[in-house]
Amino acid sequence: MSRTFYVKNTQAPKVMSTEELLSVAGGDFRQFVVSQDEENFKEVMQMPLNKFGYMLFGQEGISGRGFEVSYQEGEPAAYEVRVFTPSTERDWLGAMEFMSKLAIYLQVDIIDEEGMEYKANHITYNYRGDIEFGVRCYEGEREESFIFGVCRPIALNAEIVGRLLSAQDKVKAFSDFVESQQQHEDIFIANQIFYQNDKGEIIGTYTLTKTVPTVLPYQYPPFIDITKTDLQQEDILQWRISLVDTEGGEDGFNYLGDLDYKTFLERLPQEKIKKLDGHYMLLQMDTTQQMEALLGKTSLLGKIKNFFK
């Protein structure tokens, strides 16, 4: 679910690039689709938006879900700003600030999907009502639900949904929940990597590195991020995780081994798990011994102790 707003392009047929749109918006706005490390980063940033498709925009350190910006061809040609339902209050404020600056730059009003018009410097849309409506839509949900944040999926289980629905201020409750996901902090969100074995079967893998705070699933099987792959759960033969030490290797890293992801979850010390939502946890293993214990290995000290038992 979402709400869409239109800002007529008075410069048509010229279409601004992501780089130009961010320049118009100014401040701490950024895109969350292409990493600066990617080879085609500069090309994507300078490409007319209609050639790329849609771009997820938001604000550094602020946005929970962000908002999509795309381009509508035809008459009238317009920039589309799509805000997800529900989004956080700060997502909405950011989206309206972006629309306002874009509309002022193009010297036009803003029109929503129902034809309502808003002055560029006075957007009166009832965004709080949209957030509350979105939260109420989870009522009766029995299965885990996923929404997409600016950096990763976010899971809502029955317990979380119950807290949101029972909150007196549902807008604040939902906003606080999404903003507690630590998407903007200096932690590593483990990537899902897929490869085929010699039989052509698909294996899904994660990596956990010693001392690195890492976001990983604590539920099995892990949720597959549909924004990054077309694979389905039934396509995956097995999930595994590789454990890496930060000492001993030539490049400062030492591969310790890997294991089945379900076994990994069963062996995890509960005190190490910090649950973020209904599916993901923040995990940090501080010692080589802790990592080896997950692999079922016994340290030298442990072997000596066992010898004298």
Image (cartoon, rainbow, N blue to C red):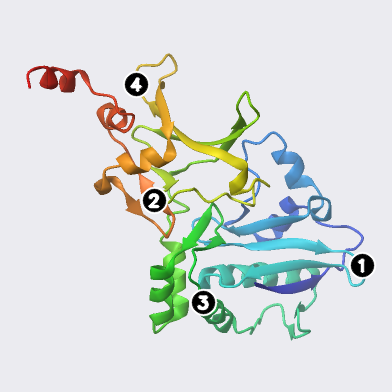
Name the side, left or right, on which 149 lies relative to 69: left
Whole-Å distance between the Cαs marked 4 and 3? 46 Å
CA distance separating discs 2 and 1: 45 Å
Which residue type does callout 2 highlight?
Answer: Met
Q: Amino acid at mark 3?
A: Val
Q: Amino acid at mark 1?
A: Gly
Label whose residue precedes the other's in the sequence (2 or 1): 1
Q: In the depicted view, which residue is nearer to us: 203 or 251? A: 203
Q: Is residue 237 visible?
A: yes
Residue indicated by mark 3: 135
Element type where label 3 sits in the image: helix
- From this view, report whether residue 251 is shown above or below residue 173: above
Q: Which residue is mark 1?
A: 74
Q: Quadrant of residue 50?
A: bottom right
Q: Nearer the viewer, residue 43 or 233?
A: 233
Q: CA gap, disc 4 to disc 1?
A: 58 Å
- Which one is closest to the eye, mark 4 or mark 3? 3
Q: If you read the primary sequence from the N terminus, does the residue marked by circle 4 or circle 3 appear first?
A: 3
Sequence-first tag of 1 and 3: 1
**Which quadrant of the rendered structure holds the C terminus?**
top left
In x, y percent, where is residue 268? 31, 42
* Residue position marked by numbered label 4 in the rendering: 247
How crowded pointer 4 is (Cα within 10 Å; few <14, some 14-19, many 20+) is rated as: few
